[in-house]
Image (spheres, grey):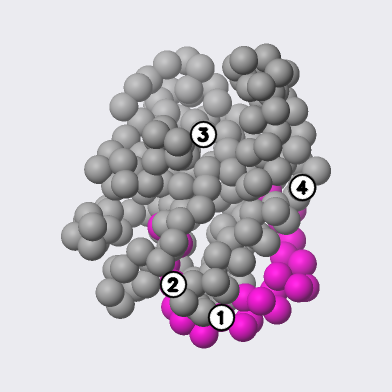
């Protein structure tokens, strides 16, 4: 596992590099990932707009800032993502804000379809669901925990929709985006900071 983590980190992007990579592909009419389609390019374009907005509007609450200030160990947030993923577009800007707020965190991003062996070690109910955050101890590349692909509230919204309709409807996808809009990244911050604090106490 450590070797796989090291290889993935070597091929990873910073947040700025990831954003630039997705943007450059879109200029060529392409999306990230092994599969290309008009839908995926369309989703990637929507996500660009969402991420630009979130980069400007996400604010870290005082209580979250204080917990970040209490971190004693350096940790790497390695996130598996793709440019077309709507959940990743909502979550990556939040993780970037957390990493910018403390010198104890470094955010690195890898593409799922380029790192399938890594992805297959962090499946969600047998699925390659993204984004997936892997918490890594930098000195040893030891995995300390993982999180994702969504905050608990968003997970529940999807589960309720599947139980009611048997599948995810377009209305469900719209409801999910509304949920993220109203949540303002708070759930992601609180859950990730809880994971960080728990690993420090291990």
First of labels 1, 4 by sequence position: 1
Residue under label 2, please give it.
75
Going from N to C along the chain, the mark reached first, 4 or 3, is: 3
Give me the C-alpha separation between circle 2 and circle 4: 26 Å
Q: Nearer the viewer, mark 4 or mark 3?
A: 4
The residue indicated by pointer 4 is 183
Foreground residue, 164 or 11?
164
Instruction: Determine whether label 1 and label 4 are within 8 Å by CB.
Output: no
Q: Secondary structure at mark 3?
A: loop
Residue under pointer 1: 71
Query: Is 58 situated left or right of 36 in this image?
Result: right
Q: Residue at x 62, y 15 (%)?
A: 166
Q: Position of residue 20 (x, y in %)?
A: 45, 46
Q: Report if residue 66 lies within the magenta region.
A: yes
Rendered residue at 52%/85% (across/down): 72
**Mark 1 touches mark 2? (CB < 8 Å):** yes
Measured Cα–Cα span from mark 1 to mark 4? 24 Å
Nearer the observer, 12 or 144: 144
N-terminal label among 2 and 4: 2
Q: Which mark is residue 85?
A: 3
What residue is drawn where x is 25% and y is 43%? 117
Residue 123, picture quadrant: top left
Numbered-mark total: 4
Q: Quadrant of residue 127?
A: top left
Question: Could you classify mark 2 by the number of other residues whose Cα lies within 10 Å: few (under 14), some (14-19), or many (20 or more)?
Answer: many
Distance from disc 4 to disc 3, alpha carbons, whole Å, reads 18 Å
**Part of the protein shown in magenta:** 54-78
Helix, strand or loop at label 4? It is helix
Q: Quadrant of the N terminus?
A: bottom left
Identified at 37% across, 72% down, the residue is: 137
Residue that sits furthest to the front in the current view: 163
């Amino acid at each position: 596992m450590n070797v796989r983590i090291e290889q993935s980190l070597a091929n990873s992007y910073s947040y700025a590099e990831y954003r630039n990579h997705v943007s450059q592909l879109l200029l060529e009419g392409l999306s990230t990932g092994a599969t290309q389609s008009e839908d995926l390019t369309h989703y990637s374009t929507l996500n660009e707009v969402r991420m630009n907005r979130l980069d400007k509007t996400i604010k870290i609450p005082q209580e979250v800032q204080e917990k970040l200030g209490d971190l004693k160990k350096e940790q790497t947030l390695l996130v598996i993502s793709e440019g077309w993923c709507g959940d990743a577009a909502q979550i990556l800007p939040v993780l970037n804000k957390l990493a910018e707020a403390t010198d104890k965190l470094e955010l690195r991003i890898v593409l799922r379809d380029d790192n399938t062996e890594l992805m297959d070690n962090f499946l969600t109910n047998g699925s390659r669901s993204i984004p997936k955050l892997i918490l890594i101890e930098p000195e040893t590349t030891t995995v300390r925990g993982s999180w994702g692909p969504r905050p608990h509230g968003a997970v529940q919204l999807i589960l309720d929709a599947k139980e009611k309709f048997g599948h995810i409807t377009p209305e469900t996808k719209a409801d999910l985006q509304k949920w993220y809009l109203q949540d303002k990244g708070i759930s992601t911050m609180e859950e990730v900071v809880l994971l960080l604090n728990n690993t420090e106490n291990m």
